[in-house]
């Protein structure tokens, strides 16, 4: 049986139609955790694709379901990473007992007692010299963020331009280069190469949240995202105020589910219809 990483993003691929039909014919009790999550993602994607103005209003209750948290944990564990501000590592959670840990976390979410913790900021070297900040949430926050990402990703995938390759599952710079080669073969030889300077540091949170609200009306999900955006920073032995700059975090949450959602809006606002974009 395929794991979540292989299943992901097939909800919008034509060659995955037979797999989807076979999956939907199963009862929930016959599905693996990955299949149950994938089945939900397919439904979310299809709803978003069919109704461009639809706003999803019941998502939070799915966030703390056991199979959802187990899949989120599997993603966090696969990424490994260092402990956050609380010092709790992946190994610590395994030693404590993953089932008990996720059960307690699910109850925190269900009863709305969950609160994000400060993000530990460290500086890491850049390939061209200098340094860039890296925010490291706690393992607990990474699990909840990953679960939220599983819900939001298919919704916003439905809104991406076909020409978009950045910060999307199962797409890469190699795919973008392939598209560029195709355009060159068609005789389109003028190329404008542009880069967004300090993209992750300069995204306006107010506009980002407005964009999210165009698709998400579940106040509980929006409150969670607001918590993560405004989480205090712990750096050089002291706490600093809520995030004024959106440091890339260790989970990929900022990369895909938030900043990736903002990117297509930015592109569409400055797009010339006669040009091809990659």
Image (tube, rainbow, N blue to C red):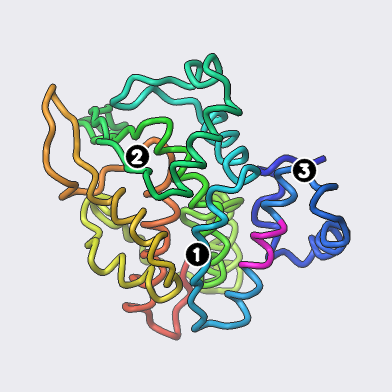
Label number found at residue 249 = 2
Q: Nearer the viewer, mark 3 or mark 1?
A: 3
Residue 218 lies in quadrant:
bottom left
Instruction: Answer with left or right where residue 246 lies relative to residue 51.
Output: left
Question: Helix, strand or loop at disc 1?
Answer: loop
Q: Against 238, is 269 above or below?
A: below
Q: In the rendered image, which residue does mark 1 sit on?
A: 164
Q: Against 164, is 115 above or below?
A: above
Question: Helix, strand or loop at disc 3?
Answer: loop
Residue name at image x 12 percent, y 43 percent: 241
Residue 274 lies in quadrant:
bottom left
Disc 3 to disc 2, how far (Cα)? 29 Å
Mark 1 burial class by Cα count in 10 Å: few <14, some 14-19, many 20+: some
Q: In the rendered image, which residue does mark 3 sit on?
A: 32
124 vs 214, nearest the viewer? 214
185 vs 195, nearest the viewer? 195
């Amino acid at each position: 049986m395929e794991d979540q990483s292989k299943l992901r993003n097939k909800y919008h691929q034509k060659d995955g139609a037979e797999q989807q039909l076979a999956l939907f014919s199963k009862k929930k009790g016959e599905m693996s955790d990955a299949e149950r999550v994938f089945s939900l993602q397919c439904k979310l994607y299809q709803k978003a694709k069919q109704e461009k103005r639809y706003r999803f209003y019941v998502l939070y209750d799915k966030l703390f379901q056991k199979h959802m948290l187990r899949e989120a944990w599997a993603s966090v564990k696969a990424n490994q990473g260092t402990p956050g501000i609380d010092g709790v590592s992946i190994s610590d959670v395994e030693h404590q007992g993953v089932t008990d840990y996720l059960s307690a976390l699910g109850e925190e979410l269900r009863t709305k007692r969950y609160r994000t913790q400060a993000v530990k900021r460290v500086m890491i070297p850049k390939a061209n010299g200098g340094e860039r900040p890296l925010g490291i949430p706690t393992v607990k926050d990474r699990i909840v963020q990953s679960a939220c990402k599983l819900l939001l990703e298919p919704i916003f995938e439905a809104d991406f331009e076909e020409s978009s390759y950045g910060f999307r599952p199962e797409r890469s710079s190699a795919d973008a280069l392939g598209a560029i080669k195709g355009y060159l073969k068609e005789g389109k030889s003028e190329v404008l190469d542009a880069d967004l300077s300090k993209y992750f540091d300069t995204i306006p949170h107010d506009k980002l949240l407005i964009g999210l609200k165009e698709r998400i009306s579940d106040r509980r999900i929006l409150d969670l995202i607001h918590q993560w955006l405004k989480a205090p920073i712990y750096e050089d032995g002291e706490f600093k105020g809520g995030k004024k700059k959106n440091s890339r975090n260790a989970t990929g949450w900022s990369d895909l589910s938030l900043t990736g959602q903002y990117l297509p809006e930015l592109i569409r606002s400055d797009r010339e219809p006669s040009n091809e974009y990659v």
